[in-house]
Amino acid sequence: MRLNINSPAYYSKQFGIENEIYNMCRGLSNFVRDKEYSSIVDTIGIVPIIAPKDEIEAGKWREEKIYDIKHKFVFISKQINYEEYCNSDIETRKKLIIKNILDSVRSIHKKAKFDYKKFENDIKEFVTSYIEKI
């Protein structure tokens, strides 16, 4: 499966890309590259949204799910609490990004006929091995 995790919307434009988050997401994408979770979806694009409440309330940075089953693709964007993320250390930020990825995939698992439990177990395995490498 191809898992494309983009830099967080709003946040990365304001503060730049955090290398540790980028490297973790890249490693995660590589970890699941040779795995299969669905017969109808082989690419998932995820964009975490980390934006202040006033931006979200103004109608910007909306969560969305877009299915393109013809091309075996799903795009998901889900919000992460801006204040919590900004006030956290890098390890907590990593956990928030992982939680966002899991929540994103959980939100599409039925329609995409996606083996969420297998994916969740693989993510936990990745996190464990990733932490050991640090």
Image (cartoon, rainbow, N blue to C red):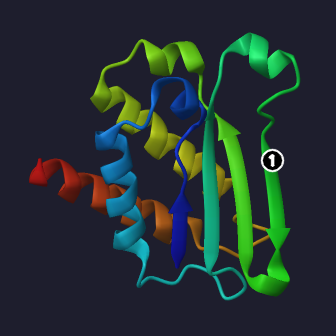
Q: Is residue 99 left or right of residue 41?
A: left
Q: Which residue occupies the extreme left position in the image?
A: 133
Q: Amino acid at mark 1?
A: Glu
- Residue pictured at 78% horizontal, 40% vertical: 63
Where does the image place residue 105, in percent across and percent down from the top left?
A: 62, 58
Q: Is residue 5 left or right of residue 126?
A: right
Q: Is residue 44 left or right of residue 32?
A: right
- Residue pictured at 50% horizontal, 16% vertical: 84
Which quadrant would residue 27 be assigned to in this image? bottom left
- Residue pictured at 82% horizontal, 80% vertical: 69
- Residue pictured at 72% horizontal, 74% vertical: 73
Where does the image place residue 94, in percent across and percent down from the top left?
A: 37, 37
As displayed, is residue 61 above or below residue 29?
above
Task: Please say whether residue 134 is visible from this viewpoint.
Answer: yes
Nearer to us in this view, 114 or 11: 11
Residue labelled with disc 1: 64
